[in-house]
Image (spheres, rainbow, N blue to C red):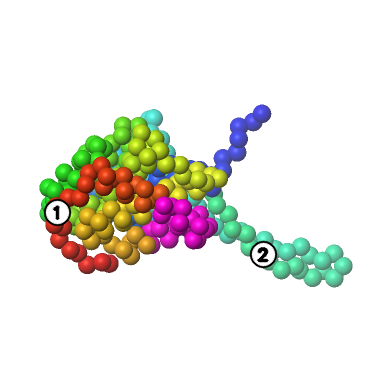
Amino acid sequence: MGKPKFNIYEHVTETIFTEMQAGTVPWRQPWSGGSGFALPLRSTGEQYRGINVLMLLIAAMKRGYDCRSWMTYRQAQELGGQVRKGEKSTTVVKFGTITKEGETDPVTGAEGEEHARRYARAYRVFNTCQIDGLDEHWYDRPAAQKEFGTQSDPALDAWFASLGVPIEHSADPRAYYHIVRDVIHMPRVQTFESAAGLYDTLAHEEAHAVAVEKRLGLTFEGKTAALKLATEECFAELTGAMVCARLGVPASARQNAAYIKHWLEILGESNGAVFRVASMAQAAADWMFAKAGDPDCDIPAVADE
């Protein structure tokens, strides 16, 4: 049997859902992004658009690229550069339209109507960090991760610590729960726009940690990995919102609602999904407060955006 044909749609879907399971969901980020989150540029200087932005941001974040520009192997050579031996390319997608003329009627000789067909074609690019010999401007780095001077609340820090899930902070601009290590990773406190954003994010990640077998052992239903992920993300967001409300953390209700709405659209359900997920979220919130009690804390209020 021959080698299976490469399916660009399956590749894109797998890449995105794998990253969502392991790291940060791009549209939920109340902290400054760091170098990996600068909008990627083509060799023409134009910004990539659509799904390619997400694909390239994921590649830059996972592989540690901090240059904004991307180009094909041939484009690098034309600009006097050379991709270093052993470097791996990143797949992006070119969308286009093919217009075909209709068939001519064999009797009347009349020409048929034209019709257009959209296509998606994969091609491979390299970040300029992978290429030697280019002019210096190709190695442009985005501005350093912005710091807002946000400070944590000792009482809340102690409350989350008492849940028993280790929490680590680093310059890595991602928030996620690492299920194998049983650790929550968070960006540095100073890079969050507010303390409310910090603890809203932490509560979301704690929900993922509480759901695992060694704690509540929750099961998220779904016929596919994508649907299971959508269910778990709805659960984590609802749990985080419940926890923040009881802690007095002024999380953004609009952001919570928009995030949950996005996942419910993927699930293709309405009230049924909400009730099932809300029941699990309540159980997780109850578990947290039974474990840690109610803290004595005071988080500054911020405007709900």
- Residue type (three-letter) at the residue carrying disc 1: Cys
The question of residue 19 being in magenta is answered with: no
Residue at point 24%, 37% (across, down): 164
Q: Quadrant of the C terminus?
A: bottom left
Residue at point 36%, 33% (across, down): 214
Q: Quadrant of residue 28?
A: bottom left
x, y percent for residue 236: 36, 50
Q: Earlier in the sequence, mark 1 or mark 2?
A: 2
Residue 93 or 178: which is nearer the viewer?
178
Can residue 273 be spotted in the picture?
Answer: yes
Magenta-colored span: 258-279
Q: Quadrant of residue 148?
A: bottom left
**Residue of label 1:** 297
**Residue of label 2:** 115
Tag nearer the camera, 1 or 2: 1
SS of the residue at dot 2? Answer: strand
Residue at point 40%, 45% (across, down): 20
What secondary structure is the magenta-colored segment mainly?
helix
Can residue 136 be spotted in the picture?
Answer: no
- From the viewer's perspective, tell me whether residue 182 is left or right of residue 48: left
Residue at point 12%, 47% (across, down): 154
Look at the picture and state if 171 lies above or below 108. Answer: above
- From the viewer's perspective, tell me whether residue 31 is left or right of residue 116: left
x, y percent for residue 228: 48, 46
Look at the picture and state if 219 lies above or below 270. Answer: above
Q: Residues within 10 Å of mark 2 (few under 14, many from 20)?
A: few
